Every structure is written in C-alpha cells, then in structure tokens.
Amino acid sequence: MRVDFKPQRLLRNLVLEEKIPNGIRRIIQTQGKNSRTIDMELSNLDSLGNPYPGDYYVSSYKVYDTKSSRLLKMMDRQVIGTANSQTALITKNASGKYDNFIITRNNDKITKK
C-alpha cells in the first residue's frame, strides 16, 4: 500500500494520522447506520523484521463500534526476531463473546492456537 495515496473517501473519514516507529498510525471513522472506528498501524517491516518490498502493509488494527465504543475485532502482529512473529486475532461472534486465536511463525513452521 502506498501511504501517500489518499483518495477523497479516505480523507473524508480520516480522523488522525501520525508517524510511529517503523510506520504510520491512522484512525478512520466511517459514517452511517453501522458506523465504525478503525485504528490501524501501517508498517514498513515484514513479519521477519526485514523492510517490506512494497511500501507499507497493515500490521495491526482494531475495529470499534463508534456508538458503544466496543471492540468488534482486532489483529496485532508482533515481530519477535528475524524468523519469528506472533499474530493475535480477536473477533466478536454472533453470541457477543470473543473468539481468540494466536498464529505463531517460527522460521518456516506456522502454528495456530
């Protein structure tokens, strides 16, 4: 994703953009009946800690219901070393409870809990 590419729709919904170490943080708020607040971090380092060959990618995000401020889903990636990363996923299911998943990458071995 090119960070400098900002279509009109993104600019209209962009609440905050700030520089963080190894990337950029953006907060976007959608409008309408099911309005959402999206807090995302764009990183220029891949899951192995190397510079990403493209431009930037979404390394973590949180999606909130704007009206109630409740977390709906989340993805957070932590680069542990040059061959290791851990990704946490949280989603709200139909019953209102949260499902948690952990994806661990250790060299070429990927495990899911």
Image (cartoon, grey):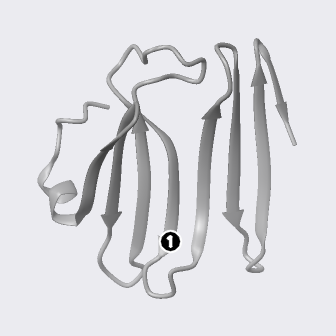
Residue 93, quarter of the rendered image = bottom right
Residue 41, quarter of the rendered image = top left
The percent position of residue 62, horizontal first and vertical second, equals 52, 59
In the picture as drawn, the residue positioned furthest to the left comes out as 8
Q: What residue is shown with label 1?
A: 64
- The quadrant in which the N terminus is found is top left
The percent position of residue 63, horizontal first and vertical second, equals 50, 64
In the picture as drawn, the residue positioned furthest to the front comes out as 21
Q: Is residue 60 left or right of residue 82?
A: left
Q: Is residue 11 above or below residue 50?
A: below
The percent position of residue 110, horizontal first and vertical second, equals 80, 24
Residue at image position (39%, 77%) is: 35
Near mark 1 (Cα within 10 A), the count class, few <14, some 14-19 or many ≥20, is some
Residue at image position (50%, 14%) is: 50
Q: Is residue 22 left or right of residue 31?
A: right
Residue at image position (78%, 31%) is: 104
Q: Is residue 82 left or right of residue 101?
A: left
The percent position of residue 108, horizontal first and vertical second, equals 76, 12
How many numbered dots are placed on residues in this image? 1
Residue at image position (47%, 23%) is: 45
Q: What amino acid does circle 1 point to?
A: Tyr
- The quadrant in which the C terminus is found is top right
Tag 1, which secondary structure? strand
54 or 76, nearer to the observer: 76
